[in-house]
Image: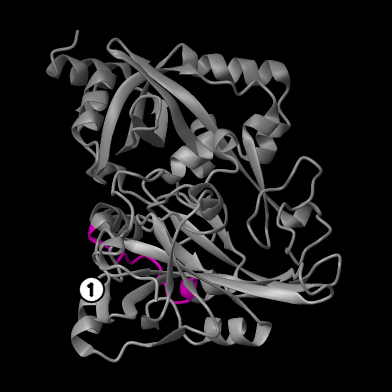
């Protein structure tokens, strides 16, 4: 066998002709036209093994359909395997990373039907060491995108491979479909969340990813690097953030009387800086002016419409954006509407930009339901807008430090009412603010 130990210094060696590792990734077997034998297909299968925190390598196999499918079905992600007689090859980095996962090794292993064997590892000592790597991330803990980053920068990220650190909100059942050319397929929808986004859809299309996803336990994490996210997931669950089918329309039930800390805008920004990297939720009160409130603009920018059946967004054409939604023809009873817009809050110390005002909180603030608001004239909407812009408001807030937010903090309004002048004056005077 073409093997020298210094090529793969960390691979466990059972003999001079075998290597052992834990399977951390698999790509579905695929067939391609065989150029040498016209009318036939060659099949390929790629998987990734790991034997230490920093070392992992891709393993590639080509051959007959029966052999490749049999090899692919012989083990799963998380299994420990021994590969006998693999051929060590320098990898073509440009081609390799287009079709296979990025690895720390400059090489790859080639498994052939005639000369190589892949079998389960039966050595307890090796297996114990390998299994300890199962929930250890292969990427640097800082090398990942938050879900908020993806939402705000999705256009520029299109087509790129990225790393995500998020908690699992729910794992959907496998859905089967038939393509236009009558090929059958399946997919699985996973909803993720983190401290920046309450619900984010991820779709798995390949069998291996779907099988792996079925083992995930919602709202639990299993890596050391996810401890902060776990704390957030736990607290978010405890306050009821995951109780509604539609998290973006859910309104938190929080006892406002329990919120007593009063901040200035600058104090909120400072507190956010102190909490960077933490998942702590901060609740507080601010006496401020709403300095941006575009409620007299296009209604489509203020109101979000969702399908009542699957909770997906309704597109500009008036149809559900979920291609698998059973409710194909939309009607007024099939659509849920709610307020969802941003406001800016300002006091003498600065401005908090892009604060979220949504759902029933927005209805109570404006004094109108969505339907009632839509029936207002433009003049009435403008008058309503200026009734807030000219008055200091008492605003209850929920704050989450978020580096990708414009003010360094993600702000959700829990309540907003025009402040009692005497109460505001006494409170601000007690804080040393004239």
Could you tell me which residue is drawn at 28 percent across and 30 percent down? Answer: 285
Q: Which x, y percent locates residue 128?
A: 21, 82
| Residue 212 shown left or right of residue 385 in the figure | left
| Residue 334 shown left or right of residue 119 in the figure | right
**On screen, residue 290 above or below 233:** above
Q: Give the colouring mode of the picture.
A: one colour
Which residues make up the magenta segment?
212-224
| Residue 245 shown left or right of residue 415 in the figure | right
Q: Which x, y percent locates residue 405?
A: 40, 30
**On screen, residue 251 above or below 112:** above
Image quadrant holding the C terminus, namely top left
Instruction: Tell me the crowding category of disc 1: few under 14, some 14 to 19, or many 20 or more residues within 10 angstroms, Cα based.
Output: few
Residue 327 visible in the displayed image:
yes
Q: Which x, y percent locates residue 351?
A: 36, 17
Q: Which x, y percent locates residue 344?
A: 44, 21
Q: Viewer-proximal residue, 371 or 306?
A: 306
**Magenta segment, principal secondary structure?**
loop
Q: Viewer-proximal residue, 71 or 267?
A: 71
Residue where numbered disc 1 is placed? 132
| Residue 297 shown left or right of residue 276 in the figure | right
Image quadrant holding the N terminus, namely bottom left
Q: Viewer-proximal residue, 21 or 411?
A: 21
């Amino acid at each position: 066998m073409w093997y020298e130990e210094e090529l793969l210094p960390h691979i466990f060696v059972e003999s001079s002709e075998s290597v052992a590792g834990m399977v951390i990734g698999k790509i579905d077997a695929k067939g391609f036209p065989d150029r040498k034998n016209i009318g036939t297909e060659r099949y390929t299968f790629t998987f990734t093994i790991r034997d230490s925190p920093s070392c992992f390598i891709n393993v590639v196999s080509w051959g007959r359909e029966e052999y490749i499918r049999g090899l692919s079905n012989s083990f799963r992600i998380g299994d420990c395997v021994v590969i006998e007689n693999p051929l060590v090859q320098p990898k073509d980095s440009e081609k390799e990373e287009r079709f296979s996962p990025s690895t720390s090794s400059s090489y790859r292993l080639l498994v052939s039907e005639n000369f190589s064997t892949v079998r389960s590892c039966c050595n307890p000592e090796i297996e114990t060491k390998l299994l300890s790597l199962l929930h250890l991330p292969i990427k640097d803990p800082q090398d990942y995108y938050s879900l908020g980053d993806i939402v705000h920068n999705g256009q520029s990220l299109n087509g790129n491979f990225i790393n995500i650190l998020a908690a699992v909100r729910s794992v959907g059942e496998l859905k089967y479909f038939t393509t236009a050319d009558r090929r059958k397929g399946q997919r699985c929808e996973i909803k993720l969340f983190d401290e920046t986004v309450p619900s984010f859809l991820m779709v798995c299309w390949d069998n291996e990813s779907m099988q792996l996803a079925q083992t995930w336990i919602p709202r639990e994490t299993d890596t050391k690097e996810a401890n902060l996210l776990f704390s957030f997931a736990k607290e978010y669950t405890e306050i009821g953030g995951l109780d509604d089918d539609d998290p973006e329309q859910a309104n938190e039930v929080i006892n406002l009387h329990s919120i007593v800390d009063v901040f200035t805008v600058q104090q909120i920004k400072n507190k956010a800086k102190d909490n960077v990297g933490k998942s702590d939720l901060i609740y507080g009160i601010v006496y401020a002016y709403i300095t941006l409130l575009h409620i007299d603009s296009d209604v489509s920018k203020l109101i979000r419409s969702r399908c009542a059946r699957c909770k997906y967004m309704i597109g500009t054409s008036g149809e559900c954006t979920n291609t698998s939604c059973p409710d194909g023809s939309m009607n007024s009873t099939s659509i849920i509407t709610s307020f969802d817009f941003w406001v800016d809050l300002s006091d003498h110390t600065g401005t908090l930009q892009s604060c979220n005002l949504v759902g029933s909180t927005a209805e109570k603030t404006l004094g109108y339901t969505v339907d009632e608001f839509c029936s207002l004239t433009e003049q009435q909407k403008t008058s309503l807008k200026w009734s807030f812009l000219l008055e200091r408001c008492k605003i209850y807030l929920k704050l989450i430090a978020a580096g990708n937010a414009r003010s360094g903090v993600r702000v959700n309004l829990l309540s907003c009412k025009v402040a009692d002048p005497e109460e505001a004056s006494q409170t601000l005077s007690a804080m040393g603010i004239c």
